[in-house]
Image: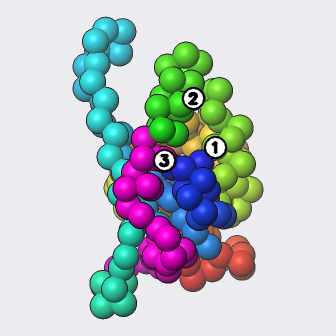
Amino acid sequence: MVRALSEVGISNVQLKWPNDLLHGFHKLGGVLIELQGDALGPSTTVIGVGLNIQLPDKVKDQINQAAVDLMSLQPDDLSRNKVLGVTLRHLMVVLAEFEANGFSALRDEWQDMHAYQDKPVVLRMPDGSEITGVVRGVSSEGALILNTSSGERRFGSGEISMRPDPKAGSELEGI
């Protein structure tokens, strides 16, 4: 998605683990992947991409986080059809790379685009507990690597929410 958006003139898009697209630490969209089947046998994958194309102020006010839309980033000459076509082309390239070499082949590029790389964060776990630490990247399988007070830990996506650590006094505070 970052490659595709860059090609249509939307620069400085970043990723937020595990599946958000950000621009200036405002949510621009997200990607969801659902898998079904056997790990070693036939399987099916559904990839869903959501992009904020045009959000009226009334809608933005109802969202519980900072959000941005494509039209406010590039209001001239932006066609949804072009965005879709470029996205599909890049998706095919990335899926072929993933199929041939796994996520590890894409890992460095992903980390270079991660908005929270080397930043202090708070993970809100499904049980309501919180874990603080500094993001140190993602594993070759895509798990978040977090440097915590008890050492390095890895987290799969699940129902984990990641936010900037407000106690760290970072430039991301309040986002």
Residue 146 numbered mark, or none: none
Q: Is 166 left, or right, of 70 in this rendering?
A: right
Q: Marks 2 and 1, how far apart in space?
A: 9 Å
Q: Is residue 7 above or below residue 23?
A: above
- Assess whether residue 168 is covered by the magenta stretch: no
In this figure, which residue is indicated by the disc labeled 1? 110
Residue 86 numbered mark, or none: 3
Q: Residue shown at 42%/47% (left/top)?
A: 85
Q: Marks 3 and 1, how far apart in space?
A: 19 Å
Q: Is 72 left, or right, of 12 in this rendering?
A: left
| Residue at the extreme top of the image, as rendered | 41
Q: Are marks 2 and 1 in contact (CB under 8 Å)?
A: yes
Please report the bounds of the magenta region as a residue range: 62-88
Mark 3 or mark 2: whose residue is earlier in sequence: 3
The location of residue 45, given as percent across then percent down, is 31, 29
Report the quarter where the C terminus lies: bottom right
Q: Residue shown at 27%/24% (left/top)?
A: 44
Q: Nearer the viewer, residue 118 or 57?
A: 57
Instruction: Give the image quarter of residue 158.
Output: top left
| Residue at the extreme front of the image, as rendered | 77
Mark 3 or mark 1: whose residue is earlier in sequence: 3
The location of residue 54, given as percent across then percent down, is 37, 76
Question: Are there few (<14), some (14-19), or many (20+) residues within 10 Å of tag 1?
Answer: some
Residue 103 numbered mark, or none: 2
Residue type, mark 1 in image: Trp
Mark toward the viewer: 3 or 1: 3
